[in-house]
C-alpha cells in the first residue's frame, strides 16, 4: 500500500512538472502583435525586454570580435613561423 502511494505521488509530480514545462505556441498573429508593440514601445516590461535584447546584441558582437581576433592571431602566427624548406 505504501509503495502504491509513493508511486502515485511520484506520477503526480512528474505530471505537474511536464505541464509546467510546456511552452505556449504562438501564431503569426501573436508575433505580429508583439512586433507592433515592440516598435511602439508598448510591450509589458518594455525596459527589461529592451535591456535583454541589448545584452544579447552585445554578446553577439563580442563573439564576432573574438572570432576576428582569433583569425588575425592565426594569420600573425603563420607569418611569424619560418618557412619549412
Image (cartoon, rainbow, N blue to C red):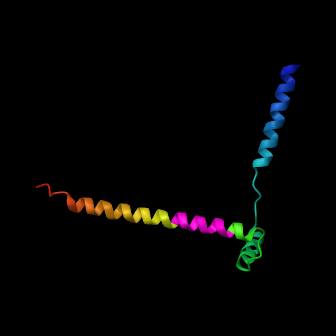
Query: How many numbered tags mark residues here?
Result: 0
Residue lying farthest left? 85
Q: Position of residue 15 (x, y in %)?
A: 81, 40
Asked which quadrant contains residue 2, the reply is top right
Res. 47 image quadrant: bottom right
Foreground residue, 9 or 41? 41
Residue 9 locus on image (x, y percent): 84, 31
Return the x and y of residue 1 as percentages of the image width and height: 89, 19
Front in this rendered view, residue 55 or 68: 55
Point out the stretch of residues depicted in magenta.
Answer: 50-60
Q: Is residue 31 above or below residue 9?
A: below
Question: For the point 41% across and 62% down, which residue is it?
Answer: 67
Q: Residue 75 in the image: x percent, y percent?
A: 28, 63
Q: Is residue 2 above or below residue 72?
A: above
Where 68 sits versus 40, above or below?
above
| Left or right of residue 81: residue 45 | right
Looking at the image, residue 71 sits to the left or right of residue 10; the answer is left
Mainly helix, strand or loop, the magenta region? helix
Nearer the observer, 25 or 5: 5
The residue most toward the top is 1
Q: Is residue 54 magenta?
A: yes
- Residue 42, picture quadrant: bottom right
Q: Is residue 9 left or right of residue 58?
A: right
Q: Residue furthest bottom?
A: 40
Q: Quadrant of the C terminus?
A: bottom left
Query: What residue is at 78 percent from the left and 38 percent from the top?
Result: 14
Amino acid at each position: 500500500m505504501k509503495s502504491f502511494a509513493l508511486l502515485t505521488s511520484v506520477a503526480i509530480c512528474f505530471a505537474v512538472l511536464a505541464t509546467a514545462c510546456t511552452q505556449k505556441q504562438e501564431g503569426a498573429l501573436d508575433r505580429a502583435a508583439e512586433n507592433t508593440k515592440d516598435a511602439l514601445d508598448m510591450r509589458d516590461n518594455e525596459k527589461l525586454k529592451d535591456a535583454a535584447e541589448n545584452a544579447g546584441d552585445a554578446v553577439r558582437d563580442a563573439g564576432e570580435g573574438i572570432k576576428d581576433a582569433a583569425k588575425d592571431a592565426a594569420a600573425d602566427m603563420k607569418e611569424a613561423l619560418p618557412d619549412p624548406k
